[in-house]
Amino acid sequence: MMDRDSSKKQLTAWKFAPAIICFCLVLFLICLPEDSLPDKHSWLDITYLDKFVHAIMFATMTFLFLLPIAESNMYQKVKRHYFIRICISACIWGLATEFIQKYYVPSRSFDIFDWVADSAGITIAWIYCRKFHRR
């Protein structure tokens, strides 16, 4: 018979629901045409603000995928393998979003620095989960 604390650490698909919702939100946001984004002369016209937005979006998404793994009762070695797989997958997804923007979204283009910002956000989420959420 499992005690309550042990049952909270079981890994279920429902624990990934926030991450999946965030993934879909990221997909929606990157598919918006440029004319639906804020005007370049608005208050959002801060140097490299879009890079911070990319980093925050991907850090949040990656964190939400890593958190259920981090708080599960898996062995540390298994958690590390999942962390690596999730982070590599998120980096590939970030690169894929740039190609989606280039080929399928009107008036959007490929920007390697957006992908670098995505990868930086992913790295931040990985470091944060390793430091504060691994058990």
Image: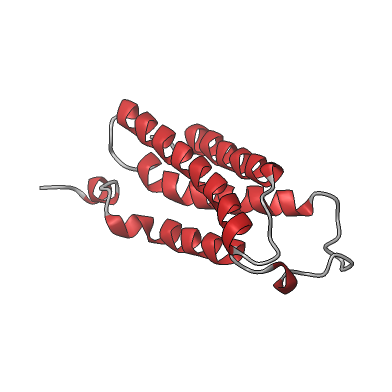
Question: As rendered, which of 40 and 20 lies closer to the eye?
Answer: 40
Q: Position of residue 21 (x, y in %)?
A: 45, 64
The residue at 61%/64% (across/down) is 105
Question: As rendered, which of 114 and 76 lies closer to the eye?
Answer: 114
The residue at 35%/56% (across/down) is 15
Which quadrant of the figure contains the C terminus? top left
The image shows a total of numbered marks equal to 0
Q: Position of residue 131 (x, y in %)?
A: 52, 32
Residue sticking out furthest to the bottom: 36
Colour basis = secondary structure
Quarter of image, res 69: top left
Question: As rendered, which of 15 and 73 lies closer to the eye?
Answer: 15
51 vs 135: above or below: below
Q: Position of residue 132 (x, y in %)?
A: 51, 37
Residue sticking out furthest to the left: 1
95 vs 50: above or below: above
Judge left or right: residue 50 versus residue 70: right
